[in-house]
Amino acid sequence: MITYNLNLEPIGKITDEQFYQLCRKNPDVNFERNARGELIIMPPTGGETGNRNAELITEFGIWNRQKNLGKIFDSNTCFKLPNGADRAPDLSWIRLERWNELTIEEREKFPPIVPDFVLELMSPSDSLKDTQEKMEEYQANGVKLGWLIVRKLQRVEIYRQGQNKEILDNPKFLYGEDVLPDFILDLGMVW
């Protein structure tokens, strides 16, 4: 399966409300929108990636319940970024005090907030180059910590605010640093 980018410029710019309604009327389709206004149509993940995404959500959920520091979101949550893009990371986390600053309406639609942390888990249909660009976009828009996990290469790219990315080959653990205090991810479940 392939990801498609549709340039809608010939028919006009799609508004935020139109994009929101398009997503709501097509719940079985995964949409994103880049900063250029192109509509991105993504295929669903396969079983292996879906299983690992679920395991990752579980690990983060356990940590978050113990710490009660923020809110965790799955890949169905689309965030409105400052550059105009609408992005849905595989997993994301926002500090509770930042989340609570949003209005109820902002929380209900596509929240106009940049997550503090994002994780992208490469699936067979993902392009490494496109996903790296997406991680750089997150970083440029204010994400403090991002992990790009490339299972088939057993590699992790770490994106930190204001720093060059770090590449780890076959790491055993990832640490949440000061963004996700005391969080440790055992990558044995991912590889």
Image (cartoon, rainbow, N blue to C red):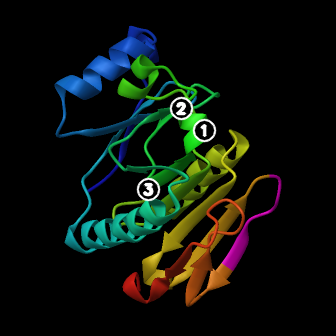
- Cα gap from disc 2 to disc 3, whole angstroms: 19 Å
Asked if labels 1 and 2 touch by Cβ distance under 8 angstroms, the answer is yes
Whether the magenta-drawn stretch holds residue 79 is answered as: no
- Asked if residue 160 lies left or right of residue 7, the reply is right
Q: Residues within 10 Å of mark 3 (few under 14, many from 20)?
A: many
Height in image: 78 above or below 106? below
Give me the disc on residue 189: none
Local secondary structure at mark 2: loop
Q: What type is the residue that disc 3 sits on?
A: Leu
Q: Tell me if residue 17 comes above or below residue 70 in the rendering.
A: above
Of the two numbered discs 3 and 1 on the same chain, state the one appearing first in sequence.
Answer: 3
Visible in this render: residue 172?
Answer: yes
User: Taking 51 as reference, is 105 left or right?
Assistant: right
Which dot, 2 or 3, sits closer to the camera? 2
- Residue density around tag 1, few if under 14, some if 14–19, many if 20 or more, within 10 Å: few
User: Disc 3 marks which residue?
Assistant: 91
Q: Position of residue 119 (x, y in %)?
A: 51, 60
Nearest to the observer: residue 43 or residue 188: 188
Secondary structure beneath disc 1? helix
Q: Nearer the viewer, residue 84 or 109?
A: 109
Give left or right: position of 108 versus 135.
left
What is the number of callouts on the image? 3
Look at the image and give the residue range highlighted in magenta.
162-167
Q: Residue 104, relative to residue 175: is it above or below?
A: above
Query: Mark 1 belongs to which amino acid?
Result: Glu
Report the residue marked by disc 1: 97
Quote the CA–CA distance across marks 2 and 1. 5 Å
For marks 2 and 3 on the same chain, the one whose residue lies earlier in the sequence = 3
Viewport quadrant of the C terminus: bottom left
Percent position of residue 162, x then y: 82, 53
- The residue pinned by badge 2 equals 100
